[in-house]
């Protein structure tokens, strides 16, 4: 049940990020957080969720996270009021890698039993 919830959450977050990325600037959800932090948090969460959603398919999870970061940045070229930047794409890729890395480290600590010893 939890696995299904995580999978739905991952796809829902990707849908929300996609909407926020390609929608006109007026329709974009606003946040009091600076855009760079907002983007990093969104793609880190996406990395965490997809890596947890597809634990036996790591390559798929990585492809979804990294592919969406690149494709969504390129998609901004299709909208007149948005702009695509290499720096933004790199930040999103780094954030996705960070999220995937967090799950990887936590799993390894839990698997080796070091999680309990770290207390």
Image (tube, grey):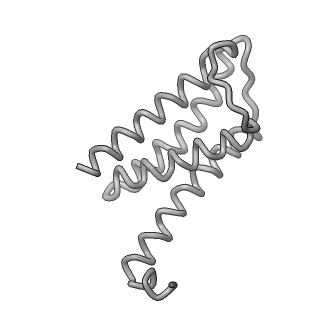
Q: Is residue 15 above or below residue 77?
A: below
Picture quadrant where residue 74 is located? top right
User: Which one is in front, 75 or 13?
Assistant: 13
The picture places residue 39, in percent across and down from the top left corner, at 66, 39
Give left or right: position of 7 versus 71.
Answer: left
Q: Residue at x 58, y 55 (%)?
A: 97
Q: Position of residue 101 (x, y in %)?
A: 54, 62
Residue plotted at (67% across, 40% down): 38
x and y, in percent, of residue 87 in the image: 77, 41
Residue sitting at 54 percent across and 22 percent down? 19
User: Looking at the image, is 26 positioned above or below residue 76?
Assistant: above
**Among the 4 quarters of the image, the one containing residue 77:** top right
Identity of the residue drawn at 60% across and 57% down: 98
| Residue 9 % position (x, y) | 39, 40
Give the camera-side residue of 47 and 117.
117
Residue at the extreme bottom? 117
Along the viewing direction, whichever of 62 and 8 lies nearer the viewer:
8
* Number of numbered callouts drawn: 0
Quarter of the figure with residue 58: bottom left
């Amino acid at each position: 049940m939890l696995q299904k919830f995580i999978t739905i959450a991952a796809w829902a977050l990707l849908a929300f990020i996609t909407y926020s990325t390609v929608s006109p600037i007026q329709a974009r959800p606003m946040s009091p957080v600076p855009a760079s932090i907002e983007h990093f948090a969104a793609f880190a969460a996406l990395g965490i969720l997809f890596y947890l959603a597809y634990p036996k398919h790591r390559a798929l999870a990585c492809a979804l996270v990294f592919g969406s970061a690149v494709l969504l940045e390129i998609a901004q070229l299709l909208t007149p009021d948005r702009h695509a930047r290499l720096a933004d794409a790199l930040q999103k890729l780094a954030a996705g890698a960070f999220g995937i890395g967090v799950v990887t480290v936590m799993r390894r600590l839990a698997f080796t039993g070091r999680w309990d010893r770290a207390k």
